[in-house]
Image (cartoon, coloured by chain):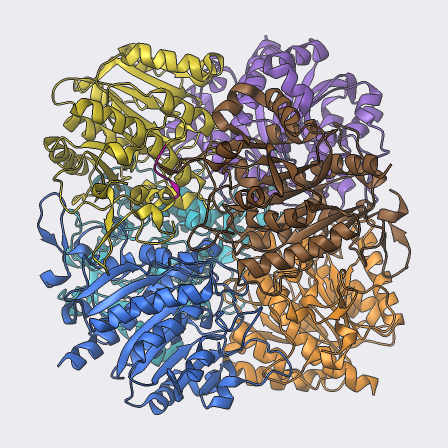
Chain colours: A brown, B yellow, C blue, D cyan, E purple, F orange
Amino acid sequence: MPESNMKKDVISGEFYDPQKRPRFNEIASFMRAPVAESLDDVDIGLIGVPFDGGTSFRPGARFGPRGVRQQSCLMRTKSHFSDIAPFELSKVRDLGDVFIDRMYNIEDAHACIERYYQEIGARNIMPLTVGGDHSITYPIFKALAKDGPIGMVHFDAHTDTWDSLYGSKFFHGAPFRRAVEDGLLDPHCTIQIGIRGSEHSGTPNFSLECGMRVIFIDEFDELGVEGVLKEIKRVVGDGKTYISFDVDGLDPAYAPGTGTPEAGGITMREALRMIRGMRGLNLIGGDVVEVAPELDPSGITALNAATLMFEMLCILSEARSKQAR
Amino acid sequence: MPESNMKKDVISGEFYDPQKRPRFNEIASFMRAPVAESLDDVDIGLIGVPFDGGTSFRPGARFGPRGVRQQSCLMRTKSHFSDIAPFELSKVRDLGDVFIDRMYNIEDAHACIERYYQEIGARNIMPLTVGGDHSITYPIFKALAKDGPIGMVHFDAHTDTWDSLYGSKFFHGAPFRRAVEDGLLDPHCTIQIGIRGSEHSGTPNFSLECGMRVIFIDEFDELGVEGVLKEIKRVVGDGKTYISFDVDGLDPAYAPGTGTPEAGGITMREALRMIRGMRGLNLIGGDVVEVAPELDPSGITALNAATLMFEMLCILSEARSKQAR
Amino acid sequence: MPESNMKKDVISGEFYDPQKRPRFNEIASFMRAPVAESLDDVDIGLIGVPFDGGTSFRPGARFGPRGVRQQSCLMRTKSHFSDIAPFELSKVRDLGDVFIDRMYNIEDAHACIERYYQEIGARNIMPLTVGGDHSITYPIFKALAKDGPIGMVHFDAHTDTWDSLYGSKFFHGAPFRRAVEDGLLDPHCTIQIGIRGSEHSGTPNFSLECGMRVIFIDEFDELGVEGVLKEIKRVVGDGKTYISFDVDGLDPAYAPGTGTPEAGGITMREALRMIRGMRGLNLIGGDVVEVAPELDPSGITALNAATLMFEMLCILSEARSKQAR
Amino acid sequence: MPESNMKKDVISGEFYDPQKRPRFNEIASFMRAPVAESLDDVDIGLIGVPFDGGTSFRPGARFGPRGVRQQSCLMRTKSHFSDIAPFELSKVRDLGDVFIDRMYNIEDAHACIERYYQEIGARNIMPLTVGGDHSITYPIFKALAKDGPIGMVHFDAHTDTWDSLYGSKFFHGAPFRRAVEDGLLDPHCTIQIGIRGSEHSGTPNFSLECGMRVIFIDEFDELGVEGVLKEIKRVVGDGKTYISFDVDGLDPAYAPGTGTPEAGGITMREALRMIRGMRGLNLIGGDVVEVAPELDPSGITALNAATLMFEMLCILSEARSKQAR
Amino acid sequence: MPESNMKKDVISGEFYDPQKRPRFNEIASFMRAPVAESLDDVDIGLIGVPFDGGTSFRPGARFGPRGVRQQSCLMRTKSHFSDIAPFELSKVRDLGDVFIDRMYNIEDAHACIERYYQEIGARNIMPLTVGGDHSITYPIFKALAKDGPIGMVHFDAHTDTWDSLYGSKFFHGAPFRRAVEDGLLDPHCTIQIGIRGSEHSGTPNFSLECGMRVIFIDEFDELGVEGVLKEIKRVVGDGKTYISFDVDGLDPAYAPGTGTPEAGGITMREALRMIRGMRGLNLIGGDVVEVAPELDPSGITALNAATLMFEMLCILSEARSKQAR
Amino acid sequence: MPESNMKKDVISGEFYDPQKRPRFNEIASFMRAPVAESLDDVDIGLIGVPFDGGTSFRPGARFGPRGVRQQSCLMRTKSHFSDIAPFELSKVRDLGDVFIDRMYNIEDAHACIERYYQEIGARNIMPLTVGGDHSITYPIFKALAKDGPIGMVHFDAHTDTWDSLYGSKFFHGAPFRRAVEDGLLDPHCTIQIGIRGSEHSGTPNFSLECGMRVIFIDEFDELGVEGVLKEIKRVVGDGKTYISFDVDGLDPAYAPGTGTPEAGGITMREALRMIRGMRGLNLIGGDVVEVAPELDPSGITALNAATLMFEMLCILSEARSKQAR
């Protein structure tokens, strides 16, 4: 491991490879990456956004960053599948959690998150985020899409393009409608995968109406992973693309610890093959959201989220290093 | 939603759509349906049978109706796959739980259950039941099959056509042998799906002997969901058909909260495709049994059971509305 | 049991005593009380307020009403200690949950709650509430104290008289400061019991400053239950008194399922003796708050909350029947 | 340890002290005692009765013997308090579980249990039993009290002297009424400790009516452990006395894994002091019942039950060795 | 069931078929097999090795044998798929757990294990083992491979052919490198299935280097179960073959209770088809390792492990009976 | 809060009071203290020792530091009882975890720990440690007692003065015998509180033999907290004193997540009063050990451990500031 991704021993003052210490050792940072002391000279920032004020059913995703930090110590340094070693390619830092100083109001909270990602963007740091509920992706997009709408590969049980609920347009079921309305997200470069669950009769599907490609779980079964990957590539092309993975896209057997689980979802083997298959896209960031660890006594939700995050880190670091050239 | 499926607000006295309230709000009824005040003018009755006195290993299915009521608040009003909106088609009511006044004796308990379903039948209400252990389907059949034997699509890890155990012919491993013996169930119109687990040497398989179609899990693997659906349709034809789904038919990863889990079962994606695929059968009722929520701290067993129940409701309501014409 | 507190059987149309059915039977209402069909002719309303938008650490109290409904089926009809049989004295109804139509904003949510309790008050119904986080007591007070400030017996680990946090003056740590400021709560008739936990240096204690009687846990140890009861009676006298019991007042061994547990609290034996000892006060209502059942796999938090609620119901029904005379 | 209480190593054929092996080693028997190969030459039999067919709320006590066997490996060989070393005084054997061949019918099951204990009694083996629900103590008494009614020290939240429920006189709330009616139990030599919980209005208390000494939890608080011990000794005198400990006598914080928990019970420190304090009574057997391990993910219910069992074993073995002289 | 596999009733002294008793009855032995009193006349020994001193992340596999004994009571006596009835073919005994008298030192512990299996081998008993962590397979091989290197079918997420870690060459990530180095394991007759997870950059893969066939999970997806079975047969041929199943080879949804779970693994349906498909190989023993039951509140890890063990028992007993001819 | 105990914001570069951020925010350090970048200018070091290789029953204490870090975010900055504000008095740092590079061998691991604490001692940093199993206190004493034997206040269910077990003299039941033998611990200035549990017959009690003051739980009941505090002060006097708190000293209701729970222990209210009561002793350090968070799904073990740690920090910081003068 290059010294730039090493940690400093508090006793000896020397740098060491955190992978060479027991996984249960040390304060848990994302994938044992060094905790940033400043934003200087960071390629990829691993960021927690502990906000679940936009949840509509079971809260708890505010503990997602903590849960994923704990389980991510099981990650190592290279993907077997792609041979990508992200810590060789990029300077990776755990940037800690976004501090949301007005957490009781969604709009105020979103403003905090947006400001934070503006700072990240100003330093040209590629963000890889752990939520928090899905409402957080909207303010992230406000910062990321300042040069025009971006594309998205979106794994989820729900389209998250509903309209307002219980008085808020910014709850976790609406971020991508807001993003399309604001010109942050290009619906024609957006693909939603794994959508399922019962629907509300009489409610038009905004995703379909605005031109997103929606792969419901029954079509997913027909296409298979390879077919889905073809669709992903067709839809996002070589435009700037963000990956957003809501863990409720997974079947509840793989992610019981989430706020609005839906039966009959994606398996982890399928999910990992899809992420690996997106290698080569023009990626600008990603997130894993809706991890609520206290709702899952077995811990596999956070473990799976950490693994999704690691595989994203691999393809993001490759994209970042190409962009840097 | 038609007013007939709405609830009355206790403060204003006005009717409201329960789907428009937060899912964690209100006393939990099955799928947020109104709780029946009488049996008049009900098309489909959602019924709990909290009895697990027929269990042979881990008890706890008496809490199945409660657990499923809780999780079923996650259901909405229309199936994406079939476009069926059951609350538009039928007057659906939560009828509460069957009161079993002599619960310490299986035969007495079964008599209570039978009487209850006789009342339901007398009002021409189609029943969709949540157990309870699988022994409850036998008294339900006594009420449903009064005009002659019916057919059944049966999802389970076990055939439940064993003979008596520990002194009872009515325990939860025997209901369908009893039903065949009594002329309630037509074995030639019965298909059992997902059967697996080790067997007792030297014990003949009553299901096969009496002419049921048994799809063991290895044949299931070969046929695939589409092949199984063909077999279902071939076996039950257009005769009166009941669907009985024992959640131990699912793999324990999807239903850990059940009394006699068996490794290596059906996934929820497969299960949902099969239920949706039964659209158009001449359905007269259904049940989801053996949900023991206290044995599953993650809650996914009851969530999956609620989802199976919702998809059954869709195809049942369509069948009911056709029958009513 | 008088017929006025009985339930109607959906099959026979006859009234029955819900205590005569198995506890796991029927849709779970608070203490198996009938669910109100209107607000007419109700003495005591059992009310759920599923709101946890004011939480500062672990959310989940929105599921408090459901959890307590489930466990409260273990309650019977008479307190051994006082011989009070509340269902003999009062017409008791489960009024369901307050519908909070703008749940993402604390102030809007509080306005919903206040309106609801104004309706309750207008019908002269005595409320016994299950939260929800502690912020809900403030809007309840707005409705209850319309004729002048009331007194309170308050069990809690925290004074809940802090000022604003993260941008809100209405979060769950501040309701009683707001209530004093608004003239709803008379601090000289308020006693807080069980207060403990570390403090923030340099922060003055508003409770002490405004004249409340605060019994920290160390003084509680010295006084014993009898001594505390004397203090309660001295402080609240014969004025209108409300009881607010935050389950984090209990030791976490008795209430692990709560948002901000504090080590070293009250035992259930002490708590029950204190509630029973308040018999004869001029009581106008009460609540049990901060029950987060999903954080407690053993279920004892909701069981203990249900028991506190039952003992409150006993003394409230006696007070109500005296007031009615 | 005397060789008579040692186990035989399957490899070497030599006897070894099971306490000298790691506690997680070997097949779990009660307190690591040897498993009996016959009933010859046994002083104290540790017996499991895995029956919960008499339960009225949450079942699961059928797994009590397994759960207690697992946790009892934490026990050692001598009580510090009394200096009694039961394995020095008595030949102690795990006799396995009573085989109940007709488990779906309470009366049949009770007949199996009675026959088993008749065999035990015929060999003059003192029984120390783990249930199972409390209904099992009634058939045990049928075998033990064949020379006339016995006395009992009974720890419980409930009197278990109710009458029939849901059609059975033999459910777990009635064993001691049946035992008094049958002349097996002398109510004037019976003391019930820890009774609490709400009551059913209008139901007379059979325990008080027939002359038992009932120490409700509020009197328990007043008397203290020493006062209770005096009452125990006064009531049972030097007559033949059986100890029956229902773990729901403990506070739910100490025994969440039980079928009908009641808030506000006995602590383990109090319980252990009471058992130790009964040294010297004319004891003829004992039981620990209503342990439902699957309802307690932390495992402390079975651990506490095992510890109660060990302390009972100490005083029973002393009594047995005196009786043998 | 032949009397040789029956148990003796302690009361009557008669032999009985343990399958004829309730599964929750009796002291839990592996698959309800009789507990051996000596090593004479045993064909297949079911052995626990409660050692987890070689673990690198989460310990707890020392409780594997207990957990699997509990859950294995769900097994019956014949495999539907193969029609093999192992208790008809072989004398099967639960031999208890290996006593490890110096458990704090891996090398000493391994020496204990090796001595034990030398004794087993000397009696020509075929071992079927439940671990413990994977380090235990190395000393088992020392005893089994005394006539030359053996082949292995190895299911796992990890190759377990790493080198030393934190000062030990014998930790649970290295047994098969040690076995190859010592000439115990023939790498050309070794196939590793299900390997996945991130890797350490710059670390060569010893398995590939020494000639093992490694089927990573992505190749597994391509080959399918049938393709993998062909590879298994090609690699191990008719040489002596051992099966080692690390439950972390399963997806964490099927085995959350293990020390180093890896996302994206084998399903139980696939696993069972593979074990059944190995019928006819020249098998000499097998193990299921890394079951840590306390990390899995739902219990499915031990249930799945017990099922894998039963299916192994079927094919082992057939192999054993052929070898005996 | 003085700036010396603040954290630096990674975005703004400014220092902030960590108590002013939501408790679920940021990477979890002990009590939200800044993570040390070097050992310069630290008064009190909060240190994790994630080692459980000395455990005799249930392992898992290696995750103690992580679990306590998570729960310690609930701590604030001042003790109400003593008015001590440790962050005002001392420069407090989370020093991270001791890196144990040879973790599979107790003696090697202890050597790592000793070296670490020698470094801490050389900088005159007062250590407050979270284990890990109790064996870690022995190497800590090797570093702390280099100028002569020290005194100890020891809370525990066990004396931990046993001799070797399963081949090791350094397992977690022996540290204080070793410490006395090595002249590190003065038995006449040592008091052990809360000792209980069954004993091994025939084993002399080393603690009593060497002159320690042992307060078994029955004497604890007699003395009460005030009486115990008197004994503490009498025994340790004004000599250098270390506090070691094994969480199994608590009753299992308060600490289910530990390796060798013992029924009938200390309550948290008693424990906190004892720690506060030790104010003014000549304290040189302390530890909280045997926290195994994965064995406690409710999380209260780690919460209680964090609270014990905070109260220790208060009295340690006062002692440290006096010593510094």
Q: Is residue F23 visible?
A: yes
Q: Residue E183 magenta-drawn? A: no
Q: Quadrant of the C terminus of chain D?
A: bottom left
Above-or-below relation of C121 to F293: below
Given residues E57 and A26, the one toward you in this image is A26
Residue C303: x and y in percent read 36, 61
Given residues D94 and A200, the one toward you in this image is A200
Residue B6: x and y in percent read 25, 45
Above-or-below relation of A22 to C212: above
Q: Quadrant of residue E211?
A: top right
Q: Is residue E4 left or right of residue A45?
A: left
Residue F90: x and y in percent read 77, 78
Above-or-below relation of C8 to D235: above
Residue at x 30% of width, y 11% of height: B235
Above-or-below relation of A13 to B80: below
Residue F91: x and y in percent read 78, 75
Q: Which residues are magenta?
A: B74-78
Q: Residue B77 magenta-drawn? A: yes
Q: Is residue D224 left or right of residue D195?
A: right
Q: Is residue A188 left or right of residue D200?
A: right
Q: Quadrant of residue F38?
A: bottom right
